[in-house]
Image: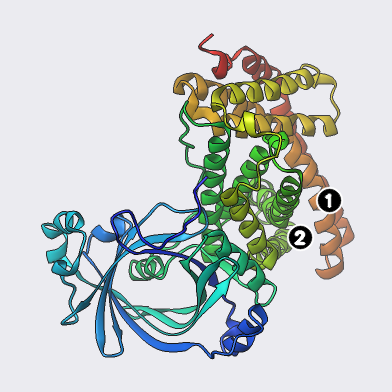
Amino acid sequence: MVPATKEKVHGDGMPIETELKLQLPPMLHGVDSHQLLTRLKPNLRSRGVKKILRNVYFDTAERDLAKRGMALRVREIGGKRIQTLKVPNSGALGLQTYRELEAELPSDMPSLAKVSDRTLARELRGEVWPRLQPVFFTNFERTSWTLPYRTSEIEVSWDRGSIRAGDREEAIHELEIELKGGDRVDLWGAAEELLDIVPFRLGHATKAARGYALADSSTAQPQKATPVKLSDEDTVAVAFEKIVTNCVAQMQANEAAMLATGAVEAIHQFRVALRRLRAIVGAYRELIDDTVHAAWSIDLRWAQRACGPARDLDVLVLETLSQMSSHLPNDEPFQRFLQVANEERAAARREAIQALHNPRYAAMQLQLFQGLHNGAWRHALAGPLLDTPVKNFAEHLLQTRYKRLMKLGERWAELPDAELHRLRIFGKKLRYVALAFSSLYKPKATKRFLDSLSDLQDCLGAVNDGAVGRHLIRQLVERAGMESAMEISDLQRIQGLVIGWQAHAVHGKVGQFQEVWAEFSETKRFWRSHR
C-alpha cells in the first residue's frame, strides 16, 4: 500500500504534483462555479482566482519525451514565460503524480539550462533537446480556490477552454483537485463530496496525453489483460493490491476505448476487467472488511450488468445472425429481422456507454481507490495472513477452486443446463485466479493448464450462448412483431431457424466436451508441478 503523502516535494527536492481530474459534462459549461463550490464549502467567500493560461507543448517528431512519460510545456501567464517539465512519479492508484521542474524563461523556447535535475538534463541533451518542436497547444481559463479540507489543503481548479493540434481541436472542461499539503486520501474524499453536487467522470488522461492523441490522430484501442507481475517476496496483501491495480488499468483503458469508438471488443474487454476484479475480490472474501467487500461487490456487479445486454447482443448478431445472413441473402424477412437486431444492439451499446457517465461509476472507483490507499479493505482479523508470503495462499486458493470444478465436472453428462452454467462459472473463476497468480509459477506448465482450461470454457460457453441467444431471440421476435410490422409467420419461421442454427452449434461443442474434459483432467496443475 502506498503511504500517505505528507509533503509536496520529492526526495531530490523537486516539487511533486498530485492531483485528481474530473471531466465535466457539457451542460455545466456555463454554470457559476463559485455557486457550486459553496455547497462543498458553505463559508467560501472568495470568487476564486481567474487566470488565462496559454501553453505550448514541445516534443520531438518521434515523441521521445512522451515515450518517457514526460511532458514539456512553456506557459504564458501574466506576461511571463514559465517552462515546466513533468516527470512521472510513482503514486497512488487513481491519482496523477508528477515531479515538476519549473523555471522562468527569457523567451518562448524551452531551455535545457533551466532543467534543474542535471542527470535528467544530461539524458535529454544529445538526442532529444536539439530536435524539440511545438506539438500542440492548450488555451483555457482557470478559476482556482485554495481550501482547507479535513487534514489537508487542496486547490480546486475549474478549467474551460480547448486543446489544439493543427486543424483539430478538443474541448477542455474539467475540475482539477490538487494536493497542496496533507494526505492523498483527502483528494478522494473531496471528489466524493463534489460528486453529490456535480456529475463527473474521472479523468484518467492528462491534458498532455489528450494533446498527443489529438496531434497524432490516435484513438484509444481495446486492451486485453496484461500479465500481473508478482514475486515470491510479495505478501498476500501486496499481491492483492497489484492484481487490483492491473485490473483497474485494463478497465480504464477499455473505458477510454468505449467512449472513443464504442467498439465491440472494448465493451468485451471492459467486462473482462470487471470480471477479473470480481473474481479477485471474491477470492479474498475472508480477508476483506465486510462493509468494504459488500460495497465493492455490489458496485462491480452493477457495472458488469450495465454492459451485459450490449455484449450478449454483440455475440448473437456477430456469431449467429450475421453468419446466417450470408447464407440467406435473398430472404427479405430475415434481413429485416437482422436490422431490428442491429438497432437493438446499438441501443444496448449506447446504454453501456451511458453507464460510464453515471455518477455511480465514478463513486465506485473513488471508493476502490480510497479503500486500497488507506488499508480500509483489510479485515481486522486478517492481519497475520495478509502479511505472509503470497505463494502458500495462492496454492491453497487454486487448489480449492480446482477441486470445486472437478467435483461438479465429473458428473457433466447428467447435469442440466443450469448446472452446466454453474460449471462454466467455476471454470471462469479458476481461470481468472490462475491468471492473477501465474507469474509465481513456471510459464510452460502454467500455459498448458490455462490453454486446457480455456478449451473447456469454450465448450461450456457455447451452451451458455445458446441459452442466452434463445432468450434474446424471443425478445427480438416480440419487438419486431410490434414495431416492424413483420408477419407473425415470418417471425416464427426465423425464430425456428435461429434456434436450430444455435442448437447445431451447441451440439457440436457438447460433442467435444468429453474429450476436452478428459484432457483437462489429465493436465498437471502448475501450482503443484514443483512437488
Give the residue at mark 1: 493
Residue lying at the far right of the rendered structure: 488
Circle 2 residues within 10 Å: few <14, some 14–19, many ≥20: some
Circle 1 residues within 10 Å: few <14, some 14–19, many ≥20: few
Q: Is residue 390 visible?
A: yes
445 lies left or right of 75? right
Which label's residue is closer to the chain start, 2 or 1? Answer: 2
Residue at 58% x, 36% y: name it. 237
Quarter that holds the C terminus: top right
Is the residue 477 above or below the residue 291 in the image?
A: below
Where's residue 222, x and y in %? 50, 53
Quadrant position of residue 425: top right
Q: Tell me the amino acid under the disc marked 1.
A: Arg
Q: Tell me the amino acid under the disc marked 2.
A: Pro
> Disc 2 vs disc 1: Cβ atoms closer than 8 Å?
yes
Where's residue 128, x and y in %? 16, 60
Q: Secondary structure at mark 2?
A: helix
Label ID, residue 333: 2
Q: Secondary structure at mark 1?
A: helix
Residues at marks 2 and 1, CA–CA distance in whole angstroms: 10 Å
Where's residue 298, x and y in %? 76, 51
Quadrant position of residue 123: bottom left
Q: Nearer the viewer, residue 32 or 500?
A: 32
Where's residue 177, x and y in %? 51, 71
Is the residue 186 above or below the residue 282 in the image?
A: below
Q: Nearer the viewer, residue 287 or 342?
A: 287
Q: Is residue 497 visible?
A: no
